[in-house]
Image (cartoon, rainbow, N blue to C red):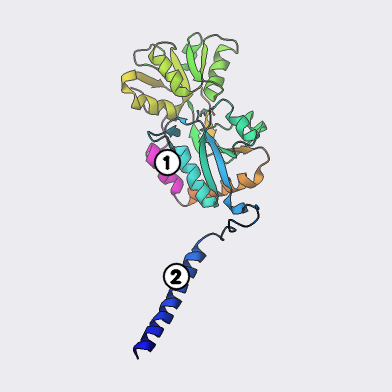
Amino acid sequence: MPTITTRKFIQTTGIVLAGLVLAACSKQEPAAPAASAPAAAPAAAKVYVVGTDAAYAPFESQNEKGEIVGFDIDVVKAVAQKAGIEVKFLNTPWEGIFNSVAQGDRDLLVSSITITPERQQTLDFSAPYFDAQQLIAVKSDSKIAKFDDLKKLKVGVQNGTTGDEVITKLQGKDSPNVKRFESTPLALKEMESGGVDAVVADNGVVVHYVNNNPNSKFKTLADSSFAAEQYGIAVKKGNTELLAKINQGLAGIREDGTYARIYAQYFGSAPVPAAAASK
Ligand code: ARG
């Protein structure tokens, strides 16, 4: 009797174990070929490289551990999960960021990039994922009241951004008073030391900086002359396959409430009012 019981036990255990192993396997992706198999890499293992200029909080920045974090990052991670693709983020200077995707060093760009007709000539964009607008930052005691007041003043911008475009249009292409910086925080730092009279950049970033740097004593000025802007995720021109996945993921996270949850986490439940930080 004890022999039968033991055998039965082993049989039963064996079946249960086999079942568990099968269940565990079926949850996973198809197994990758063994290490000894010929070099053909499994197509499913593709990790899309996402370029971002991580000096643009709260959209993309580096935390104390050097990890790239922010609203854009969370959105793309959620999009990727929905679309069933893998992504990794690489800090990429704004200068040259568009080239990095054209040359194939990056598959995707998420960097608070405003969709513009000019950029659409060399890149393809996803559906818009965020509404933005330019916003002016000045010292709290500044007399500057509107965008037009900046005509003859020194204005700091991040080189090659839409902020650069609007002030270049106001002052003229050859104006010596447009001060172009590698990053938006550098432009804002320069205003702290008195090197520029104003900074023009995206509202979300300006509001975030002013709120988080009370010692700088800055205030913000909205201006009705600024056009509405929309951020898009960019891919190499003609990469319709990847773009379709991104758009599908984006639609998916809008539909299931993930987008709204991420948005609320960074900006509260309502869109950022352009003059939220005016004091
Ligand atoms: N939205 C602006 C533009 O497209 C500024 C974006 C800057 N982004 C950044 N991560 N530095 O020109």
Mark 2 Cα-neighbour bin, 10 Å: few <14, some 14–19, many ≥20: few
| Towards the viewer: 230 or 90 | 90
Q: Which residues are magenta?
A: 257-273
The mark found on residue 114 in the picture is none
Please state the horizontal and vertical placement of residue 229, each as a whole percent of the image: 53, 31
Above or below: residue 86 compared with residue 202: below
Of the numbered discs 2 and 1, the one sitting upstream in the chain is 2
Can residue 269 be seen? Answer: no
Between the C-alphas of marks 2 and 1, the distance is: 40 Å
- Residue at point 56% right, 21% down? 165
* Amino acid on which the number 2 mark rests in the picture: Leu
Q: Is residue 120 magenta?
A: no
Q: Residue furthest left?
A: 215
Asked which quadrant contains residue 204, the reply is top left
* Amino acid on which the number 1 mark rests in the picture: Tyr
Asked which quadrant contains residue 10, the reply is bottom left
